[in-house]
């Protein structure tokens, strides 16, 4: 089942109700529906391509473009505007986009980020740019009946970092999104009476599902802001008194810097959800003591649409990411894929209707992250390998204790060391490199790079960091670059990152 029909029903049921408020304006549910119909008409006029790009800041325009793509029976491809120009260029080419819905201010932002060669560094030639603020939304929208979608019809293509150094397109179907939205609403007892405060980017699965699709599905109101400015966020909380606020731990850490924020300011918040990276004890305790607010951890991945587990006020254990949401199964296995009993650490596997259909044009990588096991209560089951290490307690609460993969989590974004190493290794002075993570109270982790130099090369940390800055998104640039005589390796020559110490 698709979310499109139920969302359109909400718009017809309560057309005057406020759906979204952002930095520029407010949108009624009727306005979202009408705008989506205009966008769908524009898509049909411009292209026959299956994939439609969306490059928009967090706000009410994003759901207009998303629903418009679905009304036109297309696949939406939300794009990460924080990527380096070369990375964004790759994603657009890989996804096959030839039409991109955007906004002028974001293009100005990208133009500044792209340097002397201009926007072509980020957006390939031949891609039609449609600025939403220049579209004519006046008059009666071109009415159309919503298409019927099967559960396995592709809904969105979300790009996430890959072990090969290139982003991977995660294919999420309409069934994936609908099941996860339904599970989240049921698990947290969300209703149209709730007001959300949305600060998460909507190109990220967390922001897409939890802060866009869930509120639209129940007919709630979301207050969006495109830039995370701590004092501004506190002001929005004071003004709009939201019931639900979701953020990554580094954002919660930054909000603590607002000195005049008080418990009274946060009194309206029923759910304050933390996800995307581990929640530091210091941040949890500071919120509890200062704001009388308990941060509730959740867990998931882009590949799981993303909500797998979620703590609620009545189902909470400190350091746990909570029980699985309805329809989702957690399984902990050893290195031989044998299920482990409660309170034993192993790799976390996930099964459920929320799990992706696969990676776009990457069948081998898709096969590598799935395993089929015969479960006592379900029979033969296809499970997704998360790469995370954790355990379930006797009550079925999940605790994440480490990562099997060498992935870094920086401000809620997944970054693989190989992405950064490949850039460092292209520098003329570098023979080889290795990147590990270092704990950071604001970002969760920051990358630290170790380099072996070529013979007679001179070590220049500033030059190497600048080299990375020109080729990577800012959050991927190493915080430090350290030179070593030789990187630790095993007998076959593989670099042993675990032997490197960031402190």
Image (cartoon, rainbow, N blue to C red):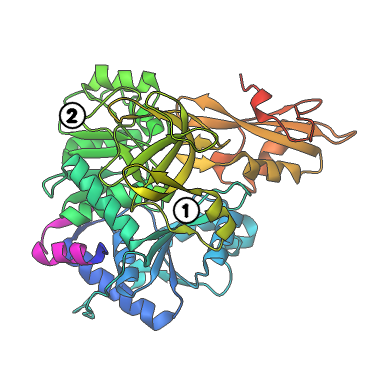
Q: Residue at x 47, y 41 (%)?
A: 386
Please provide percent x and percent y for residue 329.
34, 42
Q: Residue at x 32, y 64 (%)?
A: 151
Along the viewing direction, whichever of 34 and 226 lies nearer the viewer: 34
Q: Kindly give the residue lying farthest to the right in the view shown.
A: 456
| Stretch of the chain drawn in magenta | 5-21
**Left or right of 39 in this view: 491:** right
**Left or right of 499 in this view: 369:** left
Please name which of the two marks, 2 or 1, marks the residue nearer to the observer: 2
Quadrant containing the C terminus is top right
Displayed quadrant of residue 375 = top left
Mark 2 or 1, nearer chain start: 1
Along the viewing direction, whichever of 35 and 449 lies nearer the viewer: 449
* Residue for badge 2: 314
* Residue for badge 1: 80
107 over 82 or under it: above or below: below
Quadrant containing the N terminus is bottom left
């Amino acid at each position: 089942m698709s979310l499109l029909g139920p969302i359109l029903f909400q718009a017809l049921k309560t057309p005057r109700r406020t759906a979204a408020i952002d930095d520029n304006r407010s949108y009624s549910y009727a306005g979202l529906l009408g705008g989506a119909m205009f966008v769908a008409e524009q898509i049909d006029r411009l292209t026959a391509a299956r994939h439609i790009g969306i490059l928009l800041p967090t706000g009410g325009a994003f759901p207009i473009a998303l629903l418009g793509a679905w009304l036109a029976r297309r696949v939406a491809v939300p794009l990460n505007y924080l990527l380096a120009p070369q990375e964004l260029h790759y994603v657009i080419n890989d996804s096959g986009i030839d039409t991109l819905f955007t906004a002028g201010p974001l293009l100005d932002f990208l133009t500044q980020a792209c340097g002397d060669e201009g926007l072509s560094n980020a957006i390939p030639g031949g891609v039609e740019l449609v600025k939403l603020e220049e579209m004519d939304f006046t008059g009666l929208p071109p009415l159309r009946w919503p298409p019927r979608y099967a559960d396995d019809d592709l809904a969105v293509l979300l790009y996430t970092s890959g072990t090969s150094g290139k982003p991977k397109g995660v294919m999420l179907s309409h069934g994936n999104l609908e099941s996860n939205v339904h599970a989240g609403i049921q698990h947290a007892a969300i209703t149209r009476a709730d007001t959300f405060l949305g600060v998460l980017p909507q190109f990220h699965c967390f922001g897409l599902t939890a802060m866009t699709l869930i509120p639209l599905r129940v007919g709630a109101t979301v207050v969006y802001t495109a830039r995370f400015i701590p004092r501004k966020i506190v002001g929005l909380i004071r003004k709009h008194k939201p019931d639900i606020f979701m953020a990554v731990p580094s954002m919660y850490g930054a909000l603590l810097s607002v000195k005049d924020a008080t418990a009274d300011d946060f009194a309206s918040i029923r759910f304050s959800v933390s996800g995307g990276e581990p929640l530091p004890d210091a941040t949890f305790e500071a919120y509890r003591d200062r704001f009388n607010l308990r941060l509730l951890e959740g867990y998931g991945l882009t590949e799981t649409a993303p909500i797998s587990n979620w703590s609620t006020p009545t189902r909470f254990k400190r350091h746990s990411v909570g029980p699985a949401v309805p329809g989702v199964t957690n399984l902990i296995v050893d290195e031989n894929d044998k299920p482990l009993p409660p309170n034993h650490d192993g790799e976390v596997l996930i099964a459920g209707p929320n799990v992706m259909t696969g990676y776009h044009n990457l069948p081998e990588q898709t096969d590598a992250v799935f395993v089929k096991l015969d479960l006592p209560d379900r029979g033969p089951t296809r499970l997704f390998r998360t790469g995370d290490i954790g355990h379930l307690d006797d009550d079925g609460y999940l605790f994440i204790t480490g990562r099997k993969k060498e992935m870094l989590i920086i401000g809620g974004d997944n970054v693989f060391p190989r992405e950064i190493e490949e850039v460092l290794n292209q520098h003329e002075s570098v023979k080889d490199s290795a990147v590990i993570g270092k704990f950071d109270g604001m970002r969760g982790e920051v990358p630290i790079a170790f380099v072996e130099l070529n013979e007679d090369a001179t070590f220049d940390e500033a030059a190497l960091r600048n080299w990375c800055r020109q080729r990577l998104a800012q959050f991927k640039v190493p915080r430090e670059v350290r030179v070593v005589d030789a990187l630790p390796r095993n007998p076959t020559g593989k670099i042993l990152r675990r032997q490197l110490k960031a402190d």
